[in-house]
Image (spheres, grey):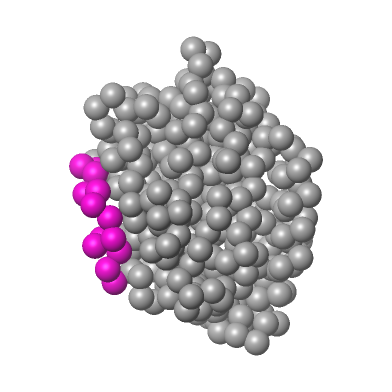
Amino acid sequence: MMYTPPLLLRNGLTMTLYIALWANRNWKATIAAPEPPYQEHVFTGAEDTPIFGIMAIPENAKGTIVGTYGITGTLDNQWYLRLLGRKAYADGYAVVLFDWRAHGKTAELSPALTSDGIFEGKDFVHIAAQAKAMGCPAPFWFTGYSLGGQLALWAVNAAETVADWGPELNIQESEMAGGAVICPSLESNRSLSYLVNAPLGKYLEGAIAKSLKQLLWQIHATHPEAIDPAAIERANSIWGFDNEIVIGRLGFDSVEDYYAATSPLYLLPKLKKPTLIVYAADDPMFDPTLVSELQHLSTENPALELVLTDHGGHVGYWNSEAGQRDSGDRDQWWAWNRILEWWQKFPVLDSQVIDVRAAKIS
């Protein structure tokens, strides 16, 4: 389905900055759906890590959405995820949103650091199992955007192998339907190199690095024994964050090895559960050569569906009025609308096995 941005937002960087700096001011006015009646809950993730989340279950829920956000932020300020929560709940889904490792209230509960999917993928599955025990119905769909999209792709992979690593979780592989992601980080080595060498990309990278450093100081304030302050001082870039703080704890010899091991581009050929990827060719955060590889992988693997657009920026997809009419949408949020539309096309069989061919976007 075609995406038609407003004329002034047909540039990936412009769209990205617009969403990041302006759209957050009035997003609540763009949709009619109210905030769901969330209940707070502390889930237990992989390695017994406490994960803070919020959950809401409508009457006669037809499935459950489990999601998180990108590289920085918290549930309190990640409005793009909260927007999905409103829309999904209004469409009849139970919703579980969570602060992932080293973020928000999860960081207050535990000094466990990020692993870019190694543990976070299993966290999704642990959360789904516990949400099931509290009344959230199958099928469970995993979602996220940007780095959160990377984590959700790892969650799909973890769901497919749960019988091997988590038989005690009381959730079946068939109860976890698949995933849907917006502008996921796919290959960290190439994209980070591209970003820091782009004319304006180094400023975007610098802003993210500054937020990561703030995150580390917040963790240090709560868990002073967990992180060496000198290492925080040296972590002045995204690469530096992972080099100083992350890779040693995970047993990697280099950041490059860590990125190669956690980049979900190399998972995509193996995924068997239905997985939708919404991706913009003008995303300024990622290496543009990934587009052709993503197209090839989606052609080779029938479980993958790629919605590739010329425009959209990084986690943008603000739709024009003409685009809303063409798509039959009630609001500007084109990407989330496509994901919700895609989820609803899957018939849930008695065995709760999802037919990949049933829900291709026309």
Q: Quadrant of residue 66?
A: top left
Q: Residue 120: in sight, yes or no?
A: no
Name the residue rendered at 57%, 24% in the picture.
354
Depth check, front residue: 153 or 308: 308
The answer to whether residue 42 is magenta is: no
- Residue 145 placement (x, y as % from top left): 51, 55
Name the residue rendered at 48%, 47% in the picture.
338
The answer to whether residue 31 is magenta is: yes
- Residue 86 placement (x, y as % from top left): 30, 47
Q: Residue furthest bottom?
A: 199
Q: Quadrant of the C terminus?
A: top right
Task: Label the magenta part by its dominant secondary structure.
Answer: loop
Depth check, front residue: 252 or 166: 166
Name the residue rendered at 45%, 54% in the picture.
326
Depth check, front residue: 167 or 361: 361
Placement of 319 over or under 50, stated as above or below:
below
- Residue 100 placement (x, y as % from top left): 45, 52
* Bounds of the magenta segment: 25-38
